[in-house]
Structures are given as structure tokens and as C-alpha cells.
Image (spheres, rainbow, N blue to C red):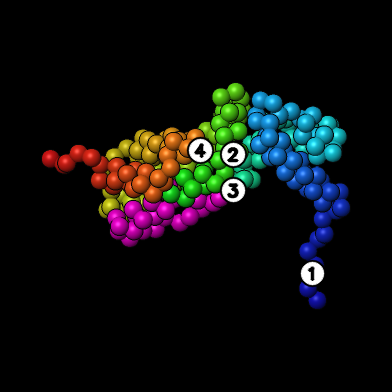
Amino acid sequence: MENKAPRRPRRYLRSRITRKLILDTALDVFLAEGYTKTTIAKISQQAKVGYGTVYSHFKGKDDILNKVVDNVLEDFYNLLEVPFTPENQEEARTAYYELVLTSFRLAEQHRPIMKVYQEALGQSDSIAEHWENIIDQFIKSSAGSFVYSKEKGMAREFDIQVGAKAYILLIDRFLWEVVNEKEKDLEHTTNVIMDMLFHGFFKPK
């Protein structure tokens, strides 16, 4: 007879449901009110849960927004899990192209909440720190792919950490350009970035 998995207590399940309700409601409030005008009181009222209940699940408004963005942009984090195993430069370019284009399309798809998040970045140290941590994860992932490329003989010698940081900060800048609707031809922008990464604009000596 197979052993059944232990059942979660009902209190745990209620807590998960309440937490999700708060996050779903907070997303609606942030989209309607923006970052500055959103308050815990408005979230609790619209979710029909107690003010203290919200604080029993989250540290405050910034913590809620960070969790909302983490949930909405889960696909961003999934990009970090994509194996980077090209065998030649053509495959490497294709892999980078798909990653960058997917990032831009996700920014375009989630533009409303990203605009709220951008508003928060200019006002909250904790929001800014959270985004910096996300950027650091992508820098580490990029550095790993650069190491792989060098080991495969596809890339010349360069400072991997500086190169990875420069590359991701460039993507980060263009991502916000997409959010603010200043970059609309995502395929063209991605191709130019790939040309910079793989070929550069100056002829070798």
C-alpha cells in the first residue's frame, strides 16, 4: 500500500488563499492608483481582509509590490534556468537573440505593472534593492554563459565580470525603453544588440 503524502493543515491552506487574494487585489490597486497613491488600507479594504491581516503576510507596501512583480514576471526568472549549451557562434547568437527578445516582449506584455514598478524605483530604496538583486542574478547568469563561450573557443579573452555587467545593464536600459514605449521594433533592437555583442562596429586591425 502506497504511503499518502501528508495533508496540509486547513489553516495553512487558508493562509495561502488569503495571501494570494491580497496579492491579486494589490495588483489591481497598483494598476488603478499607481505606486504613490496605493496604501495598505486601500488593499485591505478592496480585498475585504483586516488591515492587520495584510501585515501578517507582508512587511508593507513595498514588500507586496515586490511579490506582485515577482509573480507577474515569473517568466523573467525562468530565463535564468534556460541551459546555455551552443556548439558554435551561430547557435550562441540564436540563443542570445531569443533570450533578449523574450525579455523585451515580457516587458511589453507586462507594461502596466512595470510602469508602476518604475515609479516605485524612484521612491523606494527597498524596491530599488530588489531590482538590483534581479539584475545581479542576470549578470551572474550572463557571466556563466561567457565562461562557457570562452571554454568552447567562441569568444576572445576579456574581463568576464565587466563584460557581463555591461551587457546586462544595456539590456536593462532598453527594457525600460520598451516599457516606456520608446522602443517598438523589438526584433530590430535585438538584432543591433546582437551585432554589438558578436561583431562590434569597428573593423579589427
Q: What is the chief secondary structure element of the magenta stretch? A: helix
Q: Is residue 33 above or below residue 17?
A: above
On the image, the x and y values in percent for residue 5 come to 78, 64
Q: Nearer the viewer, mark 2 or mark 1?
A: 2
Dot placed on the residue nearer the N-terminal end, 4 or 1: 1
On the image, the x and y values in percent for residue 157 come to 26, 43
Q: Quadrant of the C terminus?
A: top left
Between 132 and 42, the one lying in front of the other is 42
Magenta part of the chain: 74-100
Q: Nearer the viewer, mark 4 or mark 1?
A: 4
Residue furthest to the bottom: 1
Residue position marked by numbered label 1 in the rendering: 3
Question: Which residue is at a point 80% across and 39% down the rendered structure image?
Answer: 47
Could you tell me the amino acid type at mark 1?
Asn
**How far apart are labels 2 and 3 at the CA level?**
16 Å
Could you tell me the amino acid type at mark 2?
Pro
Dot placed on the residue nearer the N-terminal end, 3 or 4: 3
On the image, the x and y values in percent for residue 77 come to 55, 47
Q: Is residue 1 above or below residue 188?
A: below
Q: Nearer the viewer, mark 3 or mark 4?
A: 4
Residue 171 counted in the magenta span: no
User: Which circle marks residue 74 in the picture?
Assistant: 3
Q: Nearer the viewer, mark 2 or mark 3?
A: 2
Q: Quadrant of the N terminus?
A: bottom right
Res 3 quadrant in image = bottom right
Between 111 and 136, the one lying in front of the other is 111
User: Which circle marks residue 112 in the picture?
Assistant: 2
Could you say whether the residue bearing mark 4 is in a helix, strand or loop?
helix
Residue position marked by numbered label 4 in the rendering: 179
